[in-house]
Image (cartoon, helix red, strand yellow):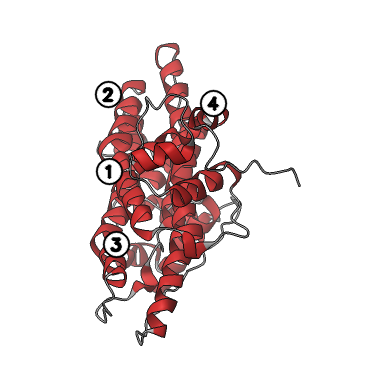
Amino acid sequence: MKNLKVYEATDRMVNIIKDNYNILQAMNSFGIYLGFGDKTVDEVCHEQEVDTFTFLTVINFTVNRHNDKLDIGKVSIPTLLKYLEASHTYYIDFQLPFIRQELADSLDTNDNLARLILKLYDEYAHSVIHHMRYEEKHVFPYVRKLLSGEAPTDYDVATFSKHHGQIDQELKELKNIIIKYLPSDGLHNNKLLATLYGIYSNEEWLKLHGDVEDCIFIPAIRALEQKRRSDGVDLSLTSLATPGTKDEDCLSQREKDVIVALVQGMSNKEIADHLCISTNTVITHRRNIAKKLQIHSPAGLTIYAIVNHLVNIESLKA
């Protein structure tokens, strides 16, 4: 295993950025702005009212993806809350709309297939926003109650971060469909490649955001809950495993029939009647299709059906 680079409070902030330009957004989420000259990390954090230990914990985790021997008890949860909330603002207000515009500019929006790609992106963006809004409405207030010493009893925190795997899967689906199925002429190809590169960077950022929550934020909350238990507060925080995925397998003819029916807008019951099978069998087929193709959205299945000649694009409504 290679030696890990661990930054300390006495290191110059400018040197950390030179070594790892990808931490710039993390710095912004902490509320640390440029123009700090040759000051050390501790000096910059002190001047900009950021907890130095918590900042270095996230930065070192960002660089090394490694949190062994982490002193969770020294992490400032209020600082982490500020960091996560600012990350949400950046992602929802800037990153998602920016990539959406870049994607639209790189596609021929007069083409039905291109419009389906944009629809798939919009579904992904909706999932991200829904998850982040859930955290802002339920998780963060819960943590603030813990910080204030209260003992909330009306919130089940076991659902925290359960959608990380689902969101990652939706972005992976979008990338794969663009790479495998979307044709591009010379006019749009350079823009499309640049947009795809941005989507990959976006995926890396979102993965890091989820890892900071799962590997730093949640353990810090657990430690806080344990402290509250010692004060007579009976609470618990449960982490959920992210389900695994399988490689794409060949579809059976019946599964292809189900895809065609889904693309045509049929409900499970309508598909069952059309194919003379039970509704439970339709549900089983749909589950198997999702596992084999790693495609879960209607727009994604429509694109798959078009490019694999299961349906004619002209027969579908745009």
Q: Badge 3 is on which residue?
A: 140
State the separation of the CA atoms marked 2 and 3. 43 Å
State the separation of the CA atoms marked 1 and 3. 14 Å
Q: Which mark is residue 110?
A: 2
Comparing marks 2 and 1, which lies closer to the viewer?
1
**Earlier residue among tags 1 and 3:** 1
Seen in the image, is 146 located left or right of residue 278?
left
Comparing marks 4 and 3, which lies closer to the viewer?
4
Kind of residue sitting beneath label 3: Phe
Comparing marks 4 and 1, which lies closer to the viewer?
4
Q: Pick the residue in front: 113 or 126.
A: 126
Q: Is residue 166 above or below residue 138?
A: above
**Earlier residue among tags 2 and 3:** 2
Mark 2, secondary structure of its residue: loop
Q: Badge 1 is on which residue?
A: 89
- Residue under the point 31% across and 72% down: 146
Kind of residue sitting beneath label 1: Thr
Comparing marks 2 and 4, which lies closer to the viewer?
4
Rendering coords of residue 31 (x, y %): 33, 40
Local crowd size for mark 2, using a 10 Å CA cut-off: few (<14), some (14–19), many (≥20): few
Mark 1, secondary structure of its residue: helix
The mark tally for this picture is: 4
